[in-house]
Amino acid sequence: MKDLLHRLFPFLAWFPMSPAGVRADVLAGLSVAMVLVPQSMAYATLAGLPVVYGLYAAALPVVIGSLWGSSRFLHTGPVAMLSLLSAASLAPFAVAGTDYFIQLSILLALMVGLMRLFLGLFRLGIIMNFVSNPVMVGFTNAAALIIGLSLLNTFFDVPKPNTGAFLTDFLGVVGQLPFAHWPTVAFGVGTLVALVGMSRVLPRLPGVLVVVVLGTLISALTGFEQNETVNPEAIATEEVRELFLEVARTRNELDEISTEIGEIGPELKRAEDLGSDTAELAVRLARLRVDEARLKKRLSDLRIEAHRHALTREAAAEDGPVFRAREEGDAGPAWRLVRAEPDSIKLSGGGRVVGNIPQGLPAFQLPVLDWNVIPALLPAAFVMALIGFMEATSISRALAAQRREKLNANQELVGQGLANIVGSFFQSYTVSGSFSRSAVAARSGAQSGLFAIISAAGVLVTMLLLTPYLYHLPLAVLAAIVMSAVFGLLNFPALFEAWKIHRADGAAGLLTFVVTLYMAPDLAMGVIVGVVLATLLFLMGTVRPRSEIQGLQPDGSLAGAISHELRPAGEDFVVLRFDASLVFMSVAHFEEAVMDAVARNPNARALLVIGTSINRIDASGIDKVRSLLTDLKAADCTLMFSGLKKPVREAMERAGLLDEIGHENVLPNKAVALEILRHKEAPKAARVEPTSD
């Protein structure tokens, strides 16, 4: 009964708690909360969401993941990798930051949670064995670069191109460097320098919280944000005014098409369920999607072009301020377009800040189930479920090793799954285990999962009381926080180490890295290609395993005759080492190896197979050995085995193969087998008469 309760409610293992342990958890929870609040907001921007959704993801999911996970010390919540994957997965279906995009982000969290819960309940954590470490290292390096570099537009305060390809977007951002807002760059660089400096000089200080507080104060005191909303007529330069209005018209047209797509999707689903003719609706939807893609590209190009036109604010007239095209030598800030509407234009002469964050707790709300999009999101949800699980289990294993505790990977899947499912009903996007926050907890002396609940309480207090004070927080500070976190994940030496150890593993890791960069923002393809390549390389090794004829070394031991240039083990027998199971994938190579050994030693009257590496034999292996017995017997050669493991011998015995081989030809080890073969060879050598001079 007790075991059942602990399986249903893993958090019961925390009890009993000592007063000292509770104090340690409270202090650790407060330390983590200082990192969690700014991190969650930063990761929300990476996911293409308003910052408040990062706070939502840092509340209830943290509690659920802690209560039902296997590790006491793993901290669940928003993480950089899944935030980027979420944004990239949804980019083809909605514009970042829109209501529909937010709905899909929450839906994706529900899908990821259900997949993780299914994997955990059916104990399918073993599926992670199909992702090799070099593949994961290659993916992590590429993803870290993509995450960091994808924030450069926020770092420079320039528009981000929307070409659908990461590398092209990156080059587009770099090309806008002359139009960067340098105070924004100063905030970003200063944040990075401060984070790196504090991590080295004052590692116990919550550096993320410090830069957020300082950045917010400096921004508020210096008037970093300068916005002005005017009528289009306030733009005195006609060419610029028309460009801004074209941005507004294109955006409105895009919004109308996106709304229409959102309406047609459910209508098409209902028609399919009723068995009605859907051809007209399907064609209409396809045309709308083509128009949507065209308008997204058009809007991106217009926004970049509009950003190149800086304006100067002139003295206010009776109807308000007037803005004209900026000329060389103009004083004051350069004003640029923020948002254009047909009847109003928002300009900025400063940098971008977080702005208003809704106060209050997330309300219970059913996720919107868009059945038109769900099938298309399934591959991305599956990859996110696996990657999130790999992150969580790798962190949990490290913490469990430090505490000498046992980790239940399947229970961790259940905990992470429930965290995402429950969170999706309270407006949370996808969450997973965080390495940085778990490390803070361990360093702060956390004793149980209570620390995570305390950290979530800190987030709730922030949502209820502190959000107005975060208005002036520069977005460049949040971008720098994410960059600092993800660039610490870069580990190129591990890829080169994998190449030195095993070329096939290194190739899989390097290809994963290249494909992930090339296919970005479709990051899922990088993992899929890496897994497929690693699996194919493994299968190639299984189909053609290592096998070698053995020769005698000077000390009498056996080694590869060809690779070490050794003399044969005997005059009328040959020894073959075969390093694989005798199963359907390897039997063809086993036959080739046996026949090659006989061909190289035509005088051999016995062939000894060293079977210490043969772990299994299947029906194909039995048939192949039986066939070789017949062929070798016809060539007056005896087939012998040494060192066969018990399961292999038992399988041969059940098939009657041991009787056909002869029990006397199946020896316990190679030493006994060699002794018998040499004993048989000795009398023949003695009968050889010396030749006369």
Image (tube, rainbow, N blue to C red):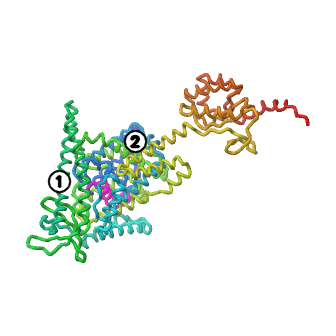
Gap in Å between the C-alphas at discs 1 and 2?
55 Å
Q: Could you tell me if residue 15 is visible in this image? A: no
Q: Position of residue 206 (x, y in %)?
A: 37, 64
Q: Quadrant of residue 435?
A: bottom left
- Give the magenta part as a residue range: 27-50
Which label belongs to residue 126?
none
Residue 143 lies in the magenta stretch: no
Q: Nearer the viewer, residue 203 or 679?
A: 679
Q: Which residue is mark 2?
A: 6
User: Which amino acid lies under the numbered mark 2 shown in the image of this protein?
Assistant: His
Q: Could you tell me if residue 548 is visible in this image? A: yes
How packed is label 2: few (under 14 Cα within 10 Å), some, or many (20 or more)? few
Q: Nearer the viewer, residue 38 or 399?
A: 38
User: Which amino acid lies under the numbered mark 1 shown in the image of this protein?
Assistant: Asn
Q: Nearer the viewer, residue 160 or 325?
A: 325
The answer to whether 268 appears left or right of 674 in the picture is left
